Image (cartoon, grey):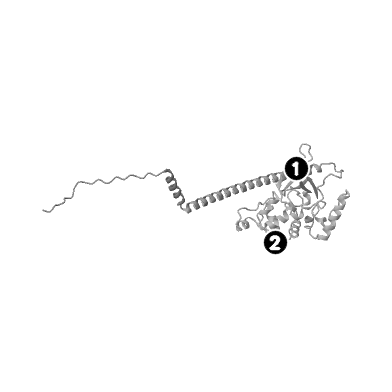
Amino acid sequence: MPHLMMKSTMPVSPIPTFPRQRGKGQTNRCASFAVKMRPKNERGIALVIVLWSVLLLTVIAGNFVFAMRTETLVARNAVSAAQAEAVANGAVHRALYETYKPAANADTWKTDGRERQWERNGAKIRVVMMDESGKIDINAGSDDLLRGLLLSVGVDAEKSEQLLDAILDWRDADTLPRPKGAESEAYRASGLKYEPANAPFDAVEQLQQVLGMSHDIYLRVAPLLTVHSRQPGINTLVAPRAVLMAIPGADPAQVDAYLEQRKQSLADGQIPSPFPAGAAFTSAAINSVINVRAEARMADGAVFVREAVVRRSGEAKRPVAFLAWKEGRPAPAAEVR
């Protein structure tokens, strides 16, 4: 009987395996190899991050420096503007002081419109004083003078008549419009939310509210008008050229010749003669209200203009009373000497 081999059903245990022990040198070689195998793009990303961080910090630092510089300039300009204002204010008070010196003194300042200049601590100062009687009173001035003023500053005849009637309608007490004037109904029709005062002007600035008065025309006539003269005519002994040109019938040659004569008389210490061509519009009396304009120009270019209207009382305790105190417009650069 053939020999039959029987398959064993007993389980066979696997042969145990043991991890290979590596020496120290072998471990370092593996680590070094892993480092060498690290992708190069990881190092590139890190470099980009560093560069962007440096750029961001640079931008932040630049903005900070620019902001600090701007704030410094703003502060410096504010200080310079305040200094210019203080100098101009002081110039007004000095000018008033100079008018109280004895009249016989040749150095006593006159309110005749002449410009006086001096320098102080690097600031250039210009002061002009003029008696308000040398201007046209917008409340008391005659129709002919007001019309002549508008024409002399370049307003055409039709517009001049319209503005004149509107001014007269504003200052009179009635509500009846003149032929080319304007009362309440005309202001409402123009979409304005105010009406004419039907009373004297409180200030020259109020003229801007008159219907038809443009900003450009106002800027041309305002320096030649006043509410303090209270006279129908003008004092030609102190009136500026632009006011003399408003006198009907006056021509440039006459005005210039008279101004030269007046200037020479003042230089000789004499009282000038009135303007011959303006005899019908002359108010001889000089009142006690003067306009003072002081301009201070600092070395860095900062400019401030103070305009004051002052009534001289002659009282020892209160020699002057300020009727107006406002900031003025600097003279054009071409006029600065």
Write the residue at 71% across / 55% down: 219
Give 189 or 78, whichever is nearer the viewer.
78
First in residue order: circle 1 vs circle 2: 1
Q: Is residue 45 left or right of residue 166?
A: left
Vertical side of 318 occupied by 65: above or below: below
Spot occupied by residue 336 in the image (x, y as percentages of width and height): 77, 53
Give 328 or 123, whichever is nearer the viewer.
123
Q: Is residue 33 visible?
A: yes
Write down the residue under mark 2. Answer: 159
Spot occupied by residue 159 in the image (x, y as percentages of width and height): 70, 61
Kindly identify the amino acid type of the residue bearing the numbered disc 2: Lys
What is the total number of numbered labels drawn onto the structure image?
2
Disc 1 vs disc 2: Cβ atoms closer than 8 Å?
Answer: no
Q: Quick one: which residue is furthest to the top in this view?
A: 317
Q: Is residue 198 left or right of residue 15?
A: right
Write down the residue under mark 1. Answer: 90
Give 328 or 139, whichever is nearer the viewer.
328
Q: Nearer the viewer, mark 1 or mark 2?
A: 1
Kindly identify the amino acid type of the residue bearing the numbered disc 1: Gly
The quarter holding residue 107 reads top right
Q: Secondary structure at mark 1?
A: helix
Vertical side of 107 occupied by 207: above or below: below
Write the residue at 62% across / 56% down: 187
- Give neighbour class at mark 1: few <14, some 14-19, many 20+ (Cα, 10 Å): some
Spot occupied by residue 49 in the image (x, y as percentages of width and height): 51, 50
- Give neighbour class at mark 2: few <14, some 14-19, many 20+ (Cα, 10 Å): some
Spot occupied by residue 279 in the image (x, y as percentages of width and height): 83, 55
Vertical side of 22 occupied by 261: above or below: below
